[in-house]
Image (cartoon, helix red, strand yellow):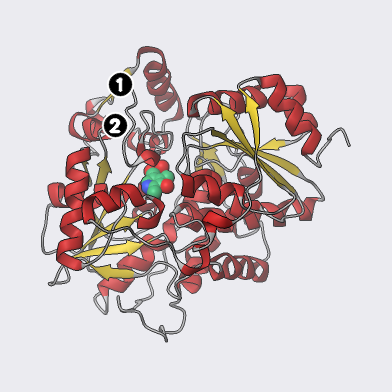
Amino acid sequence: MSLSYVSTRGKAPTLAFADVLLEGLATDGGLYVPEQWPALSTATATGTPTRSANPPPGQTYVDIATEVMWPFVNGQIDREAFEQLTAEAYSTFDHPDVAPLVPLDEDGGLWLMELFHGPTLAFKDIALQLVGRLFDYELARRGERVTIVGATSGDTGSAAIEACRDRDSLDIFVLHPRGRVSEVQRRQMTTVPSANVHNIALDGSFDDCQDLVKAMFADEAFRGRHRLAAVNSINFARVMAQIVYYVVAARALAGSDADRPVGFAVPTGNFGNVYAGYAAHRMGLDVSQFVVGSNVNDILTRFFDSARLEIRQVMPTMSPSMDIQVSSNLERLLFELNGRDGAATAALLDGFRAAGEAELPPGPAAGLAPLWSGARVDEAQTLEVIGDTYDRTGMMIDPHTAVGVGAAAAARRDPEVPLVVLATAHPAKFPDAVAQACGRRPALPERLADLGERPERCVELDNDLVAVQRFVAAHTRVGGDR
Ligand SMILES: *Cc1c(COP(=O)(O)O)cnc(C)c1O
């Protein structure tokens, strides 16, 4: 029997995994979540946080990934095919452990889990390398094709392009604001030579890019003709793939003591990463604390302090993937805090949209304090953390990761419980901030060393819906003009 998925707003039809994968957003505007949380296997699992060349049987990253994700997809995909897609997805990573744990201090209390060894050097690869393959598999099975359209301020675009490149059932169009993404980020998108990849440098801001993508989806004739689809962070399949590394970290640190709790500190933007940790917790993982790290765009810090959501202007920072005011995946946590009451969740979010502020009632708000804390790390503190980490350990960390490390230091509750900070980007992805703090420039991994010399492919377009639609129609293989 397949697991059913329900909408956080309670009014959309219940779907099975394959439809949730391809649909993304629910028809009532909500997000899909499993009808109940599957339980993690309780088999005592041992591992070591060292770089072991011979992990215990059943305990490689791919083994744990298959075990943890299987209940979510069971009945929707053949077991052998799923194992193969998972193995392929993580074979693209540079590190044999996929997501290695490295110590941040001497007494084994504070750890860094490096999630940035994938093709584009940010944690989004962990989900998207699998989700691109799942899309392709399901579309091939149905004999269908789609056109993926997305907007990016940097990291998501390259991760989505790497996930979709050369896949028969997909064409991908990514809009980025011209001149407003870093050179490394732009080149990671524009130097991919695949025929099904199309980069659009838009004469406008990131918000303009996002508005155009929304407008294309809202144009029902256009959307239907070209079968538009998205691989954005509200897709439950992305959450599912991210649950895995929380389990991997906890098992490695527990050693033979399967009951040992662990805490996580997560630099957060859209709340997708840390929400996956919460999902692992609901599946039975013993997590004592989640520290939600924010830069000066600190709506979440204020929320975890006061149970109030209050929107403010977005400010640009050196951790741009966290320059967000409305974290879409927070809706999934609000749904749980509301006792899975879709109508109450819809009312809260509608009120927030309309007024720019909302307050969680006292009952649901009582669920926050035991597990959650928020911490804000400003720009000066971010540089200080990067510099201090380099001085103490010789390791360079990127500004997003630094927000996680700074938040961990500020909000950690129990020094006896190991705390894992999730490292979300490779330092060479944000070399200017790192060089400013460390006095040395981080180097790109070998395979990307010549990124600066590779030929770029990108079209420049005006901030004009008709021009962008014309370009997409002329270049997609789905219902296109050719
Ligand atoms: C996307 C991203 C984040 C934020 O992750 P969310 O899931 O949106 O909370 C943090 N750091 C980096 C480097 C990212 O690319």
Q: Distance of mark 2 from mark 1, alpha carbons?
A: 8 Å
Q: Position of residue 435 (x, y in %)?
A: 28, 53
Are the residues at dot 2 and dot 1 in contact (C-beta closer than 8 Å)? yes
Quarter of image, res 376: top left
Q: Residue 297, which numbered label?
A: 2
- Give the residue at x 37% y 22%: 348
Quadrant holding the N terminus: bottom right
- Give the residue at x 28% y 26%: 360
Q: Is residue 424 left or right of residue 61?
A: left
Q: Residues within 10 Å of mark 1 (few under 14, many from 20)?
A: some
Q: Secondary structure at mark 1?
A: loop
- Looking at the rendered structure, the kind of residue marked 1 is Arg
Q: Say whether residue 271 is visible.
A: no
- Give the residue at x 14% y 65%: 392
Q: Looking at the picture, tell me which residue is in the foreground, 458 or 423.
A: 458
Q: Position of residue 74 (x, y in %)?
A: 60, 60
Q: Secondary structure at mark 2?
A: loop
Q: Residue 312, which numbered label?
A: 1
Quarter of image, res 116: bottom left
Q: Quadrant of ligand 1?
A: top left
- Looking at the rendered structure, the kind of residue marked 2 is Asn
Q: Position of residue 22 (x, y in %)?
A: 65, 43
